[in-house]
Image (cartoon, rainbow, N blue to C red):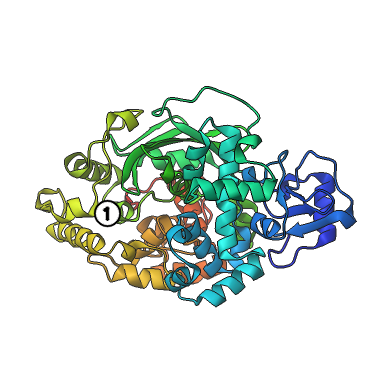
């Protein structure tokens, strides 16, 4: 496979000649004769080898002076995360940039959040992406704007805001500099403006295969009435982003894409909403790389082969993930959903009708709302409800306690400092919310059950943790394979055991 650090020009050109979809998103080709950069699957005539330059990222290509191709549209390439295993710092930085860390801050502040200096962060980005953090953020804005120009009827002022540009003037100047024309000139069709309350639809690509059945099997029983809804392969929920309440729908469509419908009073939240969709649905994963690594363990290989497109379902909000995890300790999914649904009904804010759809009516309660509540009425041990009250107060006082940390160890340490959060809860929140690919709640009862030997004898948490060393840095995906095996898939150890677990973690 291609390295993110050193691209083999001959291998890249062979992939280009073959228009090999396996390399889509892994590299971009700058064509010296045209000044354009393309995806490996571009339908245009393949340039000669001596006219090609190969880049590990779109930002690197733009930094070298190339502009995005209007035919293959690099903004629609799948966003792959396989190379990120070579630098966890860069992976965490990319997640923060996608969530808007450089919209109001600078590289030094971003480095502080990651435990490195700004100079070191720039060096890592140059090494792994061929571009600076600022260059990556700028390219993200440009490519999202270009996608909105091509695929929506938004006026240009709205496109500028929706793609993260601070001003329309800066938006116009950037496109004039890159494409030699104003942004409106890139729109090849005319259409009547859509009503303001109609969902804005954006398509996001992913790397196949994708096990949508497993993903929706996870989401459906956990959906909170009024907050979430799952019908077939369509998921909808309410969100609060940047102080704005709205709703989002996600549905897989043809061409290895998902259609994301966004209904918010302000288009400026679009980048953050799309970032959350990518996180929750794990769209940046490269299943081939993950599966190949896990398959080095012969027993895990059976699970990986049975569900090759398995993803790690993420969380929409760190506080919600922590609340649901604490409530779900030692009870069933059904019981946990009933309790959390009651919290949402009593303490969540009503969603304005203009931005609601699909039977959605309320947002999940804010930390401030639960911090001010007396949760003694909840049908759970009082110690656990007090833990929820303390958690809400801590997050209301400092939301950064649930933000990404410089490492998995730092994240777990920070989470364990919160009231009512132990090792299992911390690892589970790191897996679902912080998107730590190596998070692994080894004491989880369902994981221990799934890892039982042929005689049904479960390992201890320490024994399972020792075995999981071979699955690094993808232990979170190994955990999902183990959980899924309890739903009738192949077992980790033969002979197969009872596929149903009554003591599964409810989070």
Classify mark 1: helix, strand or loop: helix
Residue 408 placed where, x, y %?
44, 69
Image quadrant assignment for residue 470: bottom right
Q: 159 above or below 430?
A: above
Left or right: 186 as drawn, with respect to 214? right
Name the one closer to the observer, 234 or 195. Answer: 195
Image quadrant assignment for residue 181: top right
Q: 290 above or below 168?
A: below
Left or right: 22 as drawn, with respect to 309? right
Image quadrant assignment for residue 432: bottom left
| Residue designated by label 1 | 323
On the question of residue 347 being in view, the answer is yes
Few, some or many residues within 10 Å of mark 1 (<14, 14–19, 20+): many
Residue in view at x 60 percent, y 68 percent = 125
Residue in view at x 22 percent, y 66 percent = 419
Residue in view at x 75 percent, y 43 percent = 41
Name the one closer to the observer, 156 or 474. Answer: 156
Name the one closer to the observer, 133 or 477. Answer: 133
On the question of residue 452 being in view, the answer is no
Residue 180 placed where, x, y %?
70, 45
Q: Quadrant of the N terminus?
A: bottom right
Residue in view at x 32 percent, y 43 percent = 244
Total residue callouts:
1
Left or right: 89 as drawn, with respect to 371? right
Name the one closer to the observer, 84 or 73. Answer: 73
Residue 126 placed where, x, y %?
64, 69
Residue 57 placed where, x, y %?
66, 57
């Amino acid at each position: 496979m291609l390295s993110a650090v050193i691209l083999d020009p001959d291998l890249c050109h062979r992939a280009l000649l073959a228009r090999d979809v396996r390399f889509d998103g892994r590299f971009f080709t700058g064509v010296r004769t045209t000044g354009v950069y393309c995806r490996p699957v571009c339908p245009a005539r393949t340039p000669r080898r001596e006219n090609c330059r190969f880049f590990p990222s779109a930002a690197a290509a733009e930094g070298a002076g190339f502009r995005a191709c209007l035919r293959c549209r690099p903004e629609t390439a799948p966003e792959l995360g396989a190379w990120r295993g070579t630098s966890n710092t860069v992976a965490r930085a990319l997640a923060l940039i996608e969530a808007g860390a450089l919209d109001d801050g600078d590289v030094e502040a971003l480095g502080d959040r990651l435990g490195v200096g700004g100079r070191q962060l720039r060096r890592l980005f140059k090494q792994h992406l061929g571009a600076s953090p600022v260059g990556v953020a700028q390219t993200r804005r440009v490519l999202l704007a270009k996608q909105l120009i091509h695929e929506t009827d938004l006026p240009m002022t709205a496109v500028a805001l929706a793609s993260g540009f601070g001003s329309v003037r800066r938006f116009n100047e950037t496109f004039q500099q890159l494409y030699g024309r104003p942004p409106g000139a890139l729109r090849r069709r005319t259409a009547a403006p859509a009503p303001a309350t109609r969902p804005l639809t954006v398509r996001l690509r992913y790397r196949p295969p994708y096990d949508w059945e497993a993903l929706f099997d996870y989401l459906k029983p956990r959906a909170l009435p009024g907050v979430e809804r799952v019908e077939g392969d369509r998921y909808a929920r309410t969100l609060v982003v940047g102080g704005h309440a709205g709703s989002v729908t996600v549905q897989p469509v043809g061409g290895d894409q998902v259609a994301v419908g966004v209904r918010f009073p302000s288009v400026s939240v679009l980048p953050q909403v799309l970032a959350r969709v990518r996180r929750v649905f794990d769209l940046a994963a490269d299943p081939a790389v993950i599966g190949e690594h896990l398959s080095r363990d012969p027993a895990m290989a059976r699970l990986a082969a049975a569900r090759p497109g398995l993803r790690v379902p993420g969380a929409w909000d760190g506080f919600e993930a922590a609340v649901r995890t604490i409530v779900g300790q030692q009870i069933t999914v059904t019981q946990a959903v009933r309790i959390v649904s009651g919290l949402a009904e009593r303490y969540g804010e009503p969603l304005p009708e203009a931005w609601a759809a699909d039977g959605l009516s309320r947002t999940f309660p804010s930390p401030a709302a639960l911090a001010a509540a007396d949760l003694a009425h909840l049908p759970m041990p009082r110690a656990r409800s007090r833990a929820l009250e303390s958690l809400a107060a801590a997050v209301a006082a400092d939301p950064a306690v649930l933000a990404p940390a410089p490492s998995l160890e730092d994240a777990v340490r920070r989470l364990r400092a919160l009231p009512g959060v132990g090792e299992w809860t911390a690892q589970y929140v790191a897996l679902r919310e912080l998107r730590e690919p190596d998070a692994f709640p080894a004491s989880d009862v369902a994981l221990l059950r799934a890892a039982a030997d042929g005689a049904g004898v479960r390992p201890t948490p320490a024994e399972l943790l020792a075995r999981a060393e071979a699955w690094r840095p993808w232990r979170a995906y190994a955990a999902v394979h183990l959980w899924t095996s309890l739903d009738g898939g192949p077992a980790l150890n033969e002979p197969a055991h009872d596929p149903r677990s009554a003591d599964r973690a409810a989070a």
